[in-house]
Image (cartoon, rainbow, N blue to C red):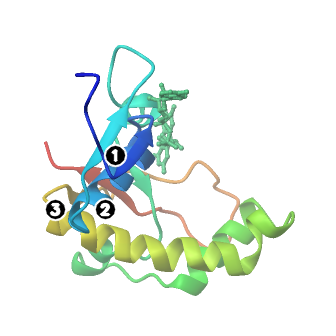
Amino acid sequence: MARDERADVLVVGSGGGGLVAALRAAAAGLNPLVIEKSDVVGGTTALSHGALWLPHNPLMEEAGLQDSVEDGVRYLQAVVGDQGPATSVRRQTAYIEGGRRLIAFLRERASCSAWSPTTPTTTRTCPARARTGACWPRR
Ligand SMILES: Cc1cc2nc3c(=O)[nH]c(=O)nc-3n(C[C@H](O)[C@H](O)[C@H](O)COP(=O)(O)OP(=O)(O)OC[C@H]3O[C@@H](n4cnc5c(N)ncnc54)[C@H](O)[C@@H]3O)c2cc1C
């Protein structure tokens, strides 16, 4: 990188969170710069194949699968519970609702493309669901 490189937004880390933040900044007309401490791009996100666990996502809906924000929250409450502000029903609802907008955005930007019906949740005792909605990046 040239020393005089300039950016509107500096993103630290090239995992899914960082790259989506950079994409969002670029979509808003800003010039993002992603810096990464390791010698490879992708972080933990790359290890997990870039999959997102997201109930009631638009790809599932298009595949005709019934799901809802309420069922997703019910699942999260059964598995994680409410351990404080980070896991409150309000936060979990925001995760699922915001996730729907995220998928719509990523699809516009040619990324998220498939829903995997073969990705079961590992928590089989949960009453709310037997499957999760996992979105995979386009290859
Ligand atoms: C095997 C596996 C399977 C998974 N499966 C799923 C799944 O099916 N569904 C799901 O939703 N989640 C899954 N996860 C979890 C998911 O991968 C992570 O929660 C997610 O990738 C975290 O993304 P992130 O952008 O926050 O962090 P990361 O992807 O870890 O990115 C952080 C990046 O920041 C860099 N960095 C850190 N500090 C600095 C610094 N000071 N300067 C510059 N760079 C820095 C790191 O090197 C890294 O590249 C899985 C995880 C694993 C390991």
The residue shown at (35%, 31%) is: 42
The residue shown at (67%, 67%) is: 76
Kind of residue sitting beneath label 2: Arg
Circle 2: element type: helix
Label 2 vs 3, first from the N-terminus: 2
The relative height of residue 99 versus residue 14 in the rendered view (above or below) is: below
Quarter placement of the C terminus: top left
Q: Is residue 122 or residue 137 the one in the foreground?
A: 137
Kind of residue sitting beneath label 3: Arg
Q: Nearer the viewer, mark 2 or mark 3?
A: 2
Q: Mark 1 CB in 8 Å range of ligand 1?
A: yes
Q: Could you tell me how far apart the alpha carbons at marks 1 and 2 are, in whole angstroms?
A: 9 Å
Residue 109: assigned label: 3
- Please name the residue that numbered disc 2 is placed on: 24
Residue 5: assigned label: none
Task: Answer left or right for 57 relative to 125.
Answer: left
**Label 2 packing within 10 angstroms: few (<14), some (14-19), many (20+):** some
Task: Answer left or right for 12 relative to 59.
Answer: right
The relative height of residue 79 versus residue 93 in the rendered view (above or below) is: above
**Label 1 packing within 10 angstroms: few (<14), some (14-19), many (20+):** some
- Please name the residue that numbered disc 1 is placed on: 19
Label 1 vs 2, first from the N-terminus: 1
Q: Quadrant of residue 85?
A: bottom right
